[in-house]
Image (cartoon, grey):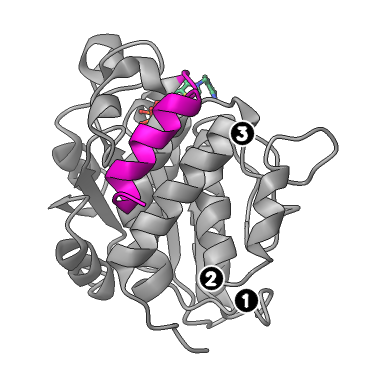
Amino acid sequence: MTIIADTSLDLARRIRARSLRMVHEARASHIGACLSIADLLAVLYSQTLRVDPVNPNRPDRDRFILSKGHAAAVLYAVLAERGFFPARLLRQYCKDGSIFAGHCSHAVPGVEVSTGSLGHGLSIGAGMALAARRDKFATRVFVLTGDGECNEGSIWEAALFAGHHRLDNLVAIVDHNGLQGFGKTEDVLNPSPLAEKWRAFGWCAVEIDGHDHAQIGKVLSEVPAECGKPTAVIAETVKGKGVGFMENQLAWHYRSPDAEQLQLALVEVEGPS
Ligand SMILES: Cc1ncc(C[n+]2csc(CCOP(=O)(O)OP(=O)(O)O)c2C)c(N)n1
């Protein structure tokens, strides 16, 4: 299985632009959540994950689960860019009868698990990691969660399970952008200090800048960060990253860009046409 070489920065730009167009055309929500993780996905899919679009069901592949399934648009975009399906199909995002549901659907090639009800991805990922170890596969399982999602009790049950079973083929990446749907994460139900909490559950926790491709690539290439422990990567991010008027603005959790806002955003992401 080869990891396709790509400039992760170019890939991040392309999937930001695709997400903006998809969300605009569908009049959908969650663009801020997509932009927050575009850099993480770009590095994962260009440098880290051992996945094969030609043979997507290889049993020894790595697994990626987007547990914050409301950011489906950017996952579909990166999968199209990596050749799991033709990019023209992205126009079906959020359309009636389409497989490209507004929250991640495993009907879409390359999507491992349907998500959207927050809090479930890590439990599923822990089960996959345990199964892979028992099957003696070199599979690694990466689960991306929101920081607001860390309000869910099921996250911490899965964390306890993974620490107990010493699942060092499991990686949780927390998108620590400080905002959730209706407010600041610290005001709604503060999960901080995150790194200390993961450590207390038997994980090795590292904190990185979630928009710095070199840092992301380095930490993900070195997992497990500590032998015999699952790895938690606390990625400091900005919700809406890459589009100035969306950055750190709660409204863009639910708002959809109109035609004028789309053009302004695309100029920032792609440069003037
Ligand atoms: C179990 C569950 N409760 C509530 C929601 C509604 N919801 C959708 S997105 C969201 C906020 C999630 O915040 P966070 O995990 O920080 O993700 P981000 O906003 O950074 O994308 C909520 C509460 C949901 N999808 N699932």
Q: Amino acid at mark 1?
A: Pro
Q: Is residue 163 magenta?
A: no
Q: Is residue 121 visible?
A: no
> Horizontal placement of 89 versus 117: left or right?
right
Q: Which residue is mark 3?
A: 25
Q: Which residue is mark 1?
A: 53
Up/down of 32 relative to 266, above or below: above
Question: Of the numbered discs in the image, which one, if any, rests on residue 156?
Answer: none
Query: What's the residue at 62%, 58% (across, down)?
Result: 112
Asked if marks 2 and 3 touch (Cβ < 8 Å), the reply is no
Asked if marks 2 and 1 touch (Cβ < 8 Å), the reply is yes
Q: Amino acid at mark 3?
A: Glu
Q: Which residue is mark 2?
A: 82
Q: Relative to the observer, which residue lies in front, 80 or 65?
A: 80
Residue 167, horizontal then vertical, whole percent: 39, 63
Query: What's the residue at 73%, 44% (across, down)?
Result: 92
List the single residue furthest toward the bottom. Answer: 1
Residue 263, horizontal then vertical, whole percent: 41, 35
Magenta stretch, residue numbers: 254-273
- The secondary structure type at the circle numbered 2 is loop
Quarter where residue 128 is shown: bottom right
Up/down of 263 relative to 121, above or below: above
Viewer-nearest of discs 3 and 1? 3
Residue 35, horizontal then vertical, whole percent: 36, 41
